[in-house]
Amino acid sequence: MRPNFRGQRPAWWPAEEPWPPRNSGRHLRGRFFRRIGGLLFLLGVFGLGGCALAFWLGAALAGVLEAPPGMPMMPWMGWRMAAPFVAPLVLAPVVVGVVVIVLALRRSTAPLGDVMEAAERVAAGDYQTRVAERGPTEARALARAFNTMTARLQADDEQRRRLLADVTHELRTPLAVIQGHLEALLDGVHPRDDAHLAAILEETRVLARLIEDLRTLSLAESGALRLQREPTDLEVVAAEAAAAFKLSAEAAGVALRVEAAGELPLLDLDPARLREVLTNLIANALRYTPRGGTVTVRLTPDAGRVGVAVQDTGVGIAPEVLPHIFDRFYKSDESRGMGLGLAIARNLVAAHGGEITAESEPGRGTTIRFTLPVTGPA
């Protein structure tokens, strides 16, 4: 079954690669089979020619063949005498042609053996296997595609191992806190009052948020996340997300505002998921903006798309950290989160057919922008 490359880019597709991908496999496959077929045809022609010549020479040497009637021939030019001299001149090109064709076939098919051997090693779990790019153009393309596949398998395997380690680490901390509190309560170290029970309840909420975030991220990355799309006023969604942080922003001494540049069209999107994106972005912005700073959510229509920018006047992000902020579980040294919020935001935006980017200047603040296509009614 051929892959279906129609529709929007899946959330798991590498951001640096174009979508839809170039489907050149059929063209290269056809060229390869035509090349092999042509070589086999030539090998058959030379083989049959060689057999015919060998039969003629054998018959001539055995005296079966006579000189053609009416052709004057000297005795020393008889067929039987001429055959030993003609044989090398006639058979040499045939032998050379067969050798050249066999070498060409070997050159064309040897890379397939390399790929088959490498595939067996990959099947055994060796994702570091690579194939040398040699042979004709089609064989080199096959080796290149195989190497790209194994590189992705290796990256996915490493990511799976890191995910397991990160999840284990994130789960260990709240579980250790819960265990410590419960042991203290059972041993009589702490009284069994509401304050200590509330601390345990808060850690269970941390666990619940982590599990829900992991579930959302897993569904989004696998392309299995179902969006409940409906015509939505993005300005209303942004205002609701900002309102949830009104008290915490006031307590932190940070000004939080929403600005819309002109009238925005209705968008066909999942308002709950977009509210989740904005919630994550606003929460991050408030976390790193000092007292007296500003966090602005700016909405701008632009040529069939709507741009959203969450801008803060916080501490900014170091240049070496900026390329990794959308990676799951990535946390800078001073980060206090779990490293999932921005990864979830990236995948939710991608699920809506949008793109998200970040720019930052240390000491002056960070701006995270994403765009959404206008696919709903205007």
Image: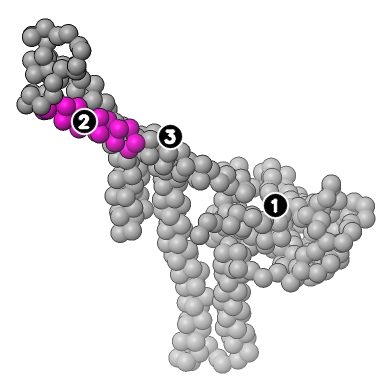
Report which residue position mark 3 lands on.
Answer: 137
Q: Quadrant of residue 326 in the image?
A: bottom right
Look at the numbered disc 1 and give the secondary structure of its residue.
strand
Q: Which residue is drawn at 48% across and 81% down?
A: 180
Report which residue position mark 2 lands on.
Answer: 52
Q: Quadrant of residue 52 in the image?
A: top left
Look at the numbered disc 3 and give the secondary structure of its residue.
helix
Which residue reaches farthest front? 70
Image height of 327 relative to 164, above or below? above
- Residue 355: numbered disc: 1
Q: Which of 124 and 35 is in front in this view?
A: 35
The Cα–Cα distance between marks 3 and 2, rounded to whole angstroms, is: 35 Å
Q: Which residue is drawn at 51% across and 41% down?
A: 27
Give coordinates of residue 114: x percent, y percent: 30, 44
- The C terminus sits in image quarter: bottom right
Q: Type of residue at label 2?
A: Ala
Q: Type of residue at label 1?
A: Glu
Image height of 71 relative to 150, above or below? above
Which label lies toward us, 2 or 1? 2
Q: Quadrant of residue 226 in the image?
A: bottom right
Q: What stretch is highlighted in magenta?
A: 40-59
Tell me which numbered mark, 2 or 1, is placed earlier along the sequence. 2
